[in-house]
Amino acid sequence: MKKIVLILMLICSIQLCGCSDNSISGSSDYSNQNSSSVSDDNIISNPKNEVGNGYIIINDELDYPSCLKDFRYDCGDKVIDYWGNEVFSVSENDLMFSCGVSAHKFENGLYGYIDKNGKTVIEPVFSEARPFVNGSALVMQNDESYYIDLNGNKSEDKTHEGYHGDLTKHDYYSTFTGQYLIYQDADAENTGVNYGYSDANGQDTDMPNITKAFSFINGFALVEATENNRKEYYFIDENLQRVTDFPDEIEDRIYFRNNMETIHLEGELLLGLEYIYGDGYFVVNTGTAREPKFELYKIIPELYQPR
């Protein structure tokens, strides 16, 4: 197997894990709220928050959802939470959390997996280790490549588990996250690529003007579109309909100073980062990799007004 290469497309990366009830140090009691306890109406009507076209920037800590407790950011030599508290230190690692764990190179020179608090959950016995996708990860041990489950036991490849379409029909380059699988077809006439989404049953939907497509996470997906030689970024919902419209300065915050991109893996496989929480919350780094500053956004499709 070729050596696994993780290429970050931008300078920062955000690692988000599933929500849990674990508490964090240094956070206020607002962090114990459940996201369902804060209604969209309250968030919209709060004058401290910034209401946009299909989204809100949440500036009031009282409107923060409890799942921010599980936010984790790889800040070079340490992992911090949303509030800047150090969770644990790291060295010589590019952590990428998925399914709540990340591959990690240990002192013995081998890879295992750690959870969002830095605890070892799978012992370091692998010479190479990929991120988990749908509960399975590709690893190498003693020149043998195989998949493991979250307990570290050998398992079947679940990369496209739940997808019932024909995987030979297109060039598929994403993992199946329960809603759609991204495909691309070379457009020889225009020397470009046509993108689309295929549902669980293999029903295809082409996406005109889309120049980059991203995996669905928790009901939403990010797309890059090009029109009149201008690139723009927005979210689509499970009906493949546009649900946000960001001003240029917001797009710069979200997509150029923060890694809301995908990560390239060998074999043309693209794995979408789990940057969108349930209920449409997502986090944006408006600072740098070493000195991050975070903003909290929420997608609210009901606010979107087509231009």
Image: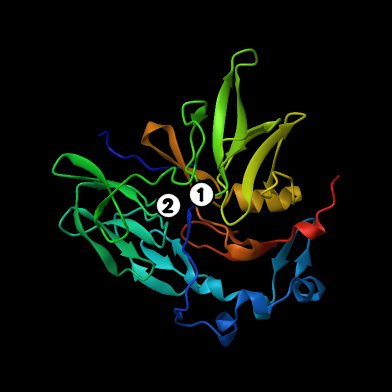
132 relative to 54 in the view: left or right: left
Q: In the image, what residue occupies the spot 51% across and 55% down?
A: 274
Q: In the image, what residue occupies the spot 74% across and 47% down?
A: 248
Q: In the image, what residue occupies the spot 76% across and 75% down?
A: 48
Q: Residue 198, position in %: x, y?
A: 58, 37
- Depth order, front residue of 157/23: 157
Is residue 100 placed above or below 242 in the rendered structure? below
The quadrant the C terminus occupies is top right
- Depth order, front residue of 19/179: 179
Is residue 149 placed above or below 66 in the rendered structure? above
Whether label 2 touches label 1, CB < 8 Å = yes
The quadrant the N terminus occupies is top left
- Which residue appears farthest toward the bottom when viewing the image? 29
Q: Residue 45, position in %: x, y?
A: 82, 74
Mark 2 Cα-neighbour bin, 10 Å: few <14, some 14–19, many ≥20: many
100 relative to 259 in the view: left or right: left
Is label 1 in a helix, a strand or a loop?
A: loop
- Depth order, front residue of 36/87: 36
The residue carrying mark 2 is 134
Question: Could you give the CA–CA distance between mark 2 and mark 1, rounded to whole angstroms?
Answer: 7 Å
Q: Amino acid at mark 2?
A: Asn
Mark 2 or mark 1, earlier in chain: 2
Q: Amino acid at mark 1?
A: Thr
The residue carrying mark 1 is 177
What colour scheme has been applied to the protein in the rendered image? Answer: rainbow
8 relative to 127 in the view: left or right: right
Mark 1 Cα-neighbour bin, 10 Å: few <14, some 14–19, many ≥20: many
Q: Quadrant of residue 281?
A: bottom right
Is label 2 in a helix, a strand or a loop?
A: loop
Q: Residue 285, position in %: x, y?
A: 57, 59
Q: Which mark is residue 1?
A: none
